[in-house]
Image (cartoon, coloured by chain):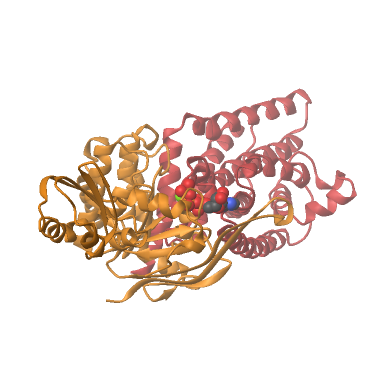
Chain colours: A red, B orange
């Protein structure tokens, strides 16, 4: 019975994001326009530079991963952003729901949306650039995607944390964290070319390991035990963010942010 | 009957600016006891901390100090369980803009864990109760203020709360809608035996709905009592105006029960009494004893508005505190 209740509460956030997505033209842009435009502009650039198939593949993996993460994390970020924009934050927090429920509910819809983006882009990549995402096999692909989804969850959560601290000022984080990660984690280049502090930073971000892991199937030399590092770091960050979330929510109830952002 | 809300020594200071250097002391030691099934009103000037107090009691805000028990549960430790049993509706309510009225109710219904059929039935009942049928499929941002307010009340009843917090439930509504909503609140409260904590700037509303009223000022509760006892406390009293012919027995008049003061000008006598309705009979009997002929009697009752103004302007020190 209690489990049913928890599931209904979690499902509420899936439905909410789904209805808002459905009703908003802008969200169509988010899952179709930007990913496709980004994909083609980078894909065509690789053609122009006359990169060999391996190099082009390296970059396409990066581009598609970026799109998947961006679409998935924004759903998690939206869970509080929609409330923020509607000034309805306090009604979510006066209901007996746990942050775990709204994070996982909105993450679920993010996974669905970004999986659609992935299918679309990988279909386009084999069609137009002859690059096959299924080459590593179904299991590695699934592990890779699962890693990307979890990373998106982590980014979305950090946006939520920032919203609870900074309110409206945190909006920019929803769009900038992913780009910042792209810079550091080697979306378009191997991290070995990064200068010193960034190189070490990249090693502290799980995305680095998942990209290396997936690229290793296409002939790019990767480190050892990449999945272990990737998932291990994800677990560590999840624990840290869960604790942070708790602290930040307590702080929000102390400072009155929840009420102030609802007026 | 048990105690629904018990608050002891609630203090709250808001901090802002760098390192919280700017401080605003809002609540300075609030004690409250509200019985189950009671409708309790909180009055006070703008910015005195009514919303802050309601937010603290509804677990949205932590106090700096103090103890709060809601239905016997420690609301600071057991917030999650308290949230199952309480709900809030505020004036100028905001819900998710692009969801329709009905979708919003479904969303919040799900947050309270209501399952499919049960939820659908409850929402339909609430939509009917608040006459939202024609508006149920309109997105929230296109609803009128009155409809938003009704939706907010409907939302606040989704979990059948035992304690309901209403923050200015009729603010910004036209008089006829306000009256309807007020009546609905009363009917629902009686039917369900809910405890209601309400803030308002509308004195008629307070008088109509509340069993007891607290007056908040300077971060403290200045006084608590029924509307009647508050009126008595400020000794404004009711005014009995008598048009007469003849002479008034002034000595007897001032000694009569309940008379606070009087004044005579020409053939009009204004008598201030503690409770007009109760004293009127005696007064007339007393005055009729001599050669006095009474032409016309009018009874003007103090309303809560005067009490409010009196409380709001007086210094704390010259008020008779608490009953
Ligand atoms: N989250 C907050 N952060 C900082 N200050 C706040 C916050 N919430 C309220 N205040 C301040 O606390 C004081 C009390 O505010 P509150 O909203 O509780 O008053 P109120 O009695 O409800 O007023 P009104 O009658 O206008 O609704 C105000 O001076 C307000 O500026
Ligand atoms: Mg207020």
Q: Residue at x 61, y 33 (%)?
A: A125
Seen in the picture, residue B186 relative to A67 is either above or below; the reply is below
Can residue A98 be seen at all in this image of the molecule?
no
Rendered-image quadrant of the N terminus of chain A: bottom left
Which quadrant holds residue A56? top right
Does A185 sit left or right of B28 as displayed?
right
Q: Residue at x 70, y 61 (%)?
A: A233
Residue B226, given in percent of the width and then of the height, sits at 30, 63
Q: Residue at x 68, y 29 (%)?
A: A43
Does A150 sit left or right of A227 as displayed?
left
Q: Nearer the viewer, residue B8 or B110?
A: B8
Residue A148, given in percent of the width and then of the height, sits at 62, 50
Q: Nearer the viewer, residue A137 or A227?
A: A227
Which quadrant holds residue B321? bottom left
Of all residues shown, which one is farthest toward the top?
Answer: A48
Residue B228, given in percent of the width and then of the height, sits at 28, 60
Does B99 sit left or right of A62 as displayed?
left
Q: Nearer the viewer, residue A84 or B59?
A: B59
Seen in the picture, residue A116 relative to A34 is either above or below; the reply is below
Can residue A176 be seen at all in this image of the molecule?
yes
Q: Nearer the viewer, residue B219 or B320?
A: B320
């Amino acid at each position: 019975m209690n489990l049913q209740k928890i599931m209904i509460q979690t499902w509420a956030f899936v439905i909410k994001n789904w209805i808002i997505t459905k009703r908003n033209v802008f969200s169509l842009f988010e899952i179709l326009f930007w990913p496709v435009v980004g994909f083609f502009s980078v894909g065509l650039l690789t053609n122009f530079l006359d990169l060999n198939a391996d190099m082009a593949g390296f970059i396409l993996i990066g581009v598609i991963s970026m799109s998947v993460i961006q679409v998935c994390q924004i759903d998690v970020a939206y869970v509080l952003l929609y409330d923020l924009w509607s000034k309805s934050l306090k009604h979510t927090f006066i209901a007996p729901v746990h942050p775990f429920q709204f994070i996982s509910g909105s993450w679920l819809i993010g996974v669905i949306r970004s999986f659609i983006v992935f299918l679309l882009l990988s279909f386009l990549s084999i069609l137009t650039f002859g690059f096959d995402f299924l080459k590593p096999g179904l299991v590695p692909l699934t592990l890779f995607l699962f890693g990307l989804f979890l990373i998106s969850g982590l980014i979305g959560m950090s946006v939520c944390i920032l919203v609870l601290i900074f309110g409206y000022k945190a909006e920019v984080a929803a769009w900038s964290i992913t780009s910042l990660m792209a810079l550091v984690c080697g979306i378009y280049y191997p991290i070995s070319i990064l200068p010193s502090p960034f190189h070490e930073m990249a090693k502290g971000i799980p995305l680095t390991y998942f990209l290396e892991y997936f690229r290793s199937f296409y002939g790019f030399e990767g480190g050892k035990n990449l999945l272990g590092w990737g998932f291990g770091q994800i677990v560590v960050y999840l624990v840290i963010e869960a604790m942070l979330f708790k602290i930040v929510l307590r702080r929000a109830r102390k400072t009155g942010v929840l009420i102030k952002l609802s007026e | 009957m048990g105690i629904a809300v018990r608050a002891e020594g609630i203090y709250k200071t808001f901090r802002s600016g760098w390192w919280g250097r700017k401080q605003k002391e809002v609540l300075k030691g609030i004690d409250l006891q509200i019985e189950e099934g009671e409708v309790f009103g909180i009055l006070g000037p703008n910015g005195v901390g009514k919303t802050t107090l309601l937010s603290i009691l509804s677990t949205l805000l932590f106090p700096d100090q103090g103890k709060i028990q809601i239905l016997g549960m420690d609301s600071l430790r057991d917030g999650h369980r308290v949230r199952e049993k309480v709900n809030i509706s505020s004036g100028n309510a905001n819900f998710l803009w692009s969801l329709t009225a009905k979708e919003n109710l479904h969303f919040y219904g799900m947050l309270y864990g209501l399952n499919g059929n049960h939820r659908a039935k409850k929402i339909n009942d609430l939509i009917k109760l608040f006459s939202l049928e024609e508006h149920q499929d309109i997105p929230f941002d296109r609803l009128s203020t009155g409809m938003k307010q009704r939706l907010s009340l409907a939302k606040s009843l989704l979990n059948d709360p035992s304690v309901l917090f209403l923050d200015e439930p009729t603010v910004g509504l036209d008089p006829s809608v306000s009256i309807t909503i007020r009546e609905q609140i009363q009917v629902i409260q009686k039917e369900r035996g809910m405890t209601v904590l309400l803030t308002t700037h509308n004195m008629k509303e307070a008088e109509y709905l509340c069993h007891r009223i607290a007056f908040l000022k300077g971060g403290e509760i200045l006084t608590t009592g029924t509307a009647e006892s508050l009126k008595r406390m400020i000794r404004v009293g009711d005014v009995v105006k008598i048009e007469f012919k003849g002479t008034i027995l002034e000595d007897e008049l001032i000694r009569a029960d309940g008379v606070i003061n009087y004044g005579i000008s020409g053939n009009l006598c204004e008598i201030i009494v503690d409770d007009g309705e109760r004293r009127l009979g005696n007064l007339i009997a007393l005055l009729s004893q001599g050669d006095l002929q009474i032409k016309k009697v009018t009874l003007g009752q103090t309303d809560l508005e005067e009490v409010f103004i009196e409380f709001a302007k007086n210094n704390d020190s010259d008020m008779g505190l608490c009953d």
